[in-house]
Amino acid sequence: MKKKIITGLALFTLIFFLATVYVIFTIETTTSRLDNLIKLHQIEILREHLLIHIARIQTDLKSRDRDNKTILTTINNMAKVADTCFNCHHNEIVMKKLVDLRSHIHEYKESVTGILIVGDNFSALHAKAEKAFRIGEDLIAEVNSMITMTSSRLDEKTRSALQKIADTKSTLFIVLALGPILATVLSLIFIKAITEPLNTILDATRRLKAGDLDYRVASLKDEFGEVAASFNEMASSLKQQILNMQRTEQLRVCGEIATGLAHEIKNPLAGIKVSMEVLSEDSSLSAEDRTVLTQVIGEVRRIDALLKGLLNFAKPPVPQLTPTNVNNIIDICMTFSTKIPSASSGNGLKAIAVVKNFDSRLPVIMADQMQLQQVFLNLLLNAVDAMSGGGTLTINTSRNPDGKAIRIEIGDTGKGINRELVKKIFQPFFTTKAKGTGMGLAITRRIVEEHGGGISIESEQGKGTTFTIVLPVRKES
């Protein structure tokens, strides 16, 4: 988002700069056109002044009471006006005409000056006056020709210049009008790009506050995408913490119930068990009654085992952490079990093959060895029970790439578990076995979590089940 804002600001600055350059260039061009137009009109005025001076001299030449001093002043002014025309830049053709005009003006000036210094010789004066007058008439015709020729061009240039100025003014107005519109559009785009993600995140926080812990923010990019990812992680963590708190509360309640049950049921249950055992030893009982008493004693023992499991789950003993080699613990569990065949001896159930992939560089961890034996033995026995028709038991141990935890995988090729049941597999009193108490996996999960680890399950009906345990690597304190 930061890059987009910088790019947008740079683009806006560039557009503003180009618009400013265009406005300055337009003003300069328009000013230059106006200056040229004014100069052309000034030249036209000078030529008309030149024509006026010549006409005045011609009039004075015809007048009998002419003032020689006035004529000299006028003719000098006429020469100055003619010389002024050369101060402007002209093309080659116009320049040639101006040179010819100045030559004719010089000739006219000499003729008129000759009249004024002749004296009283009337015939000579009349001849020079006639000559000067003819030159003046020719000069007037020449100047009129130039004025007529340039007037048409000046009108055309004036109309063209005014049209260009009008077009430039319209374009300038459009640019000035589009500037605020463009700025508004870019501002709205930037505001939308910032406010929409913020509103999305704000809506997500409100839904999270309302208790919707499953809501997740999606489809955000750039820095807002990172904020959304952090929000999603926070929501997941918060949900997990709430679930853990609920589970802790459930365990507390379960512990109180277990303690009460143990106090209220266990002692009377022990008395019932002893009484049933005494009655079952009575020789006068029939075989049918003895069988019933034996079944009652078995059910009492199952209730007693259930109470013990409930107590172990609700109030497990504090783990006694010692340096532990997990590979050795698993080997011990396989040796102690009468159902799981040893990889070296080949004793036990030959229909079940055991595959061990132990990491020889597995680090020693701090754990309660007796509790880990209980965990692994429970999982191994469940795996064997799931493969009543034979199969393969696979045990893998490895170290996480970051070196902060170890991973234990215990998998079987048994009948597997239904997906709906997988979600309940670690709940107390839930079991898929006909004679199970439903406390084994619940206690297993509790022990693993007491060690700071976690346990998960992957199962597919007809293909088997795999339990994965992750335990942290702790240094001995």
Image (cartoon, rainbow, N blue to C red):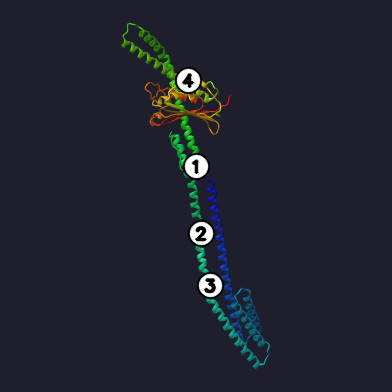
**Does label 2 or label 4 sit earlier along the sequence?**
2
- Work out how far the residue at label 3 is from the one at label 1, CA to CA, in angstroms: 63 Å
Where residue 18 sits, quadrant-wise, is bottom right
The residue depicted at 47 percent of the width and 44 percent of the height is 196
Q: Nearer the viewer, mark 1 or mark 2?
A: 1
Q: Residues within 10 Å of mark 4 (few under 14, many from 20)?
A: some
Q: Which residue is disc 4 drawn over?
A: 336
The amino acid on which the numbered mark 3 sits, given as a three-letter code, is Lys
Q: Which residue is disc 2 drawn over?
A: 175
Q: Classify 99 as above or below 173.
A: below
The amino acid on which the numbered mark 2 sits, given as a three-letter code, is Val
Q: Nearer the viewer, mark 2 or mark 4?
A: 4
Element assignment for label 4? helix
Q: Residues within 10 Å of mark 1 (few under 14, many from 20)?
A: some
* Image location of residue 159, percent across then percent down: 51, 71
- Work out how far the residue at label 3 is from the one at label 2, CA to CA, in angstroms: 26 Å
* Image location of residue 35, percent across then percent down: 58, 69
Element assignment for label 2? helix
Q: Which residue is disc 3 drawn over?
A: 157
Q: Is residue 407 left or right of residue 64?
A: left
Would you say the residues marked 2 and 4 are in contact, meaning their CB atoms lie under 8 Å apart? no
The amino acid on which the numbered mark 4 sits, given as a three-letter code, is Phe
- Work out how far the residue at label 1 is from the one at label 2, CA to CA, in angstroms: 38 Å
Residue 426 visible in the shown view: no
Q: Which residue is disc 1 drawn over?
A: 225
Frontmost residue, 61 versus 273: 273
